[in-house]
Amino acid sequence: MNAPNLQDFLQFPVEILCPRCQKEQLFVEGDQIRCPHCEASFGFEDRIADLIVGDRFPDEIQEEELLYEDECIRDATNNYWLPTFLRHTSRGNKPLQVLSLGCGTGIDIDLLTDEGFSTMGIDNGNRTRLWTLRKYPNRLLLANGLHMPFADNTFDLIYCGCVFPHIGVEGDSYKVTDHYLEERQLLANEMVRVTKPGGQLFMASPNRLFPLDIFHGRTQGKHIPRCNVSMAPFLLSTGDYRKLFLKAGCHSVNALPSKGYWGFLRSGRSLKGRLISLPVRTLFSMTSSLKVLHGSFFNPWIVVHIHMSR
């Protein structure tokens, strides 16, 4: 009798290939996941398939911060990603195949799946201990975006929030390596490879051109943002994304309004927080009102949209 196929075993909504050779479907043999082509072997973590190629991202996080991040992902999914996807896509008879790249706690997979999208999520960090609580754990994989376990032209839509700045860095730091551009290009190439012709890509992250990074390095009760030098390569601008994806073969890279992405949930819980966050919330509203400001240095957070050629 043949060994059970991984897709049958975990009921994934898309075909899962070996992330090393990307040539054959994987099969389960005992407590191992194996590739019949290159003989690579993978395992499980908390009943989640671990298909990570390379190092796992060392983003350790305390429980309280993890739960807050879960709340933020829920808010961004409901108030930004879902309305954006509905605005930029049309639903046919089949549900759109969607990949959340760097899905963190995985709550977005539950929310989008409940809204009719056929959603998968991958991550290679340490936010995954909440995955056992998810409604659709069979739609989550431990995997590296640089080596995705998917066939060419699998997804109609791929999105990621603040993934690119953490590619090509030393550990979980703001210091890039000597080969950071090559790694970021590899990620862009992989995203394009697994997206269908006519599909769409969405990336979001702090804006390199903005003088403050208000999204990294702050803990609960701390309101002072991290200073950002526009020439520092940790963050990306719309122009940086454009270079990466034009080189990957795309032809259209545009910035979208960012209002609604952040709900400022923590700062909204106190009068001091609401007052301190008021200028940033005003910037989100102002820069979203004019297209010319979407990717400008006035905007602390950028969302980039790519429509693939047919």
Image (spheres, rainbow, N blue to C red):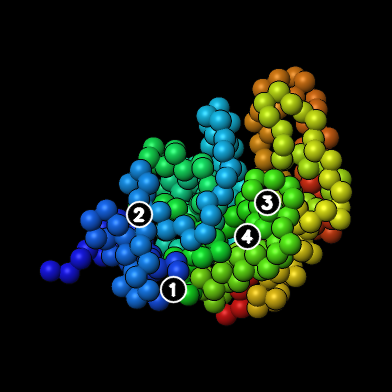
Residue 23, percent from left and from top: 40, 76
Q: Residues within 10 Å of mark 4 (few under 14, many from 20)?
A: many
Decide if residue 309 is in sight here: yes
Q: Is residue 7 left or right of residue 216?
A: left
53 or 284: which is nearer to us? Answer: 53
Q: Dot 1 corresponds to which residue? A: 21
Q: Nearer the viewer, mark 3 or mark 4?
A: 3
For mark 4, what is the residue? Answer: 202
Give the CA distance from mark 1 to mark 3: 26 Å
Q: Residue furthest top?
A: 271
- The residue labelled by disc 3 is 170
Q: Earlier in the sequence, mark 3 or mark 4?
A: 3
Q: SS of the residue at dot 2?
A: strand
Could one spot residue 120 in this view of the protein?
no
Amino acid at pointer 4: Phe
In what element is the residue under mark 3?
loop
Q: Which residue is mark 2?
A: 43
Query: Which x, y percent locates residue 294?
Result: 79, 55
Upstream in sequence: badge 1 or badge 2: 1
Separation (CA) of disc 2 from disc 3: 26 Å
Q: Residues within 10 Å of mark 1 (few under 14, many from 20)?
A: some
The quarter in which the N terminus is drawn is bottom left
Going 48% across and 74% down the picture, which residue do you hit? 153
Give the CA separation, mark 1 to mark 2: 17 Å
Q: Quadrant of the C terminus?
A: bottom right
Q: Amino acid at mark 3?
A: Glu
Q: Say which amino acid is labelled 2.
A: Gly
**Identity of the amino acid at label 1?**
Cys
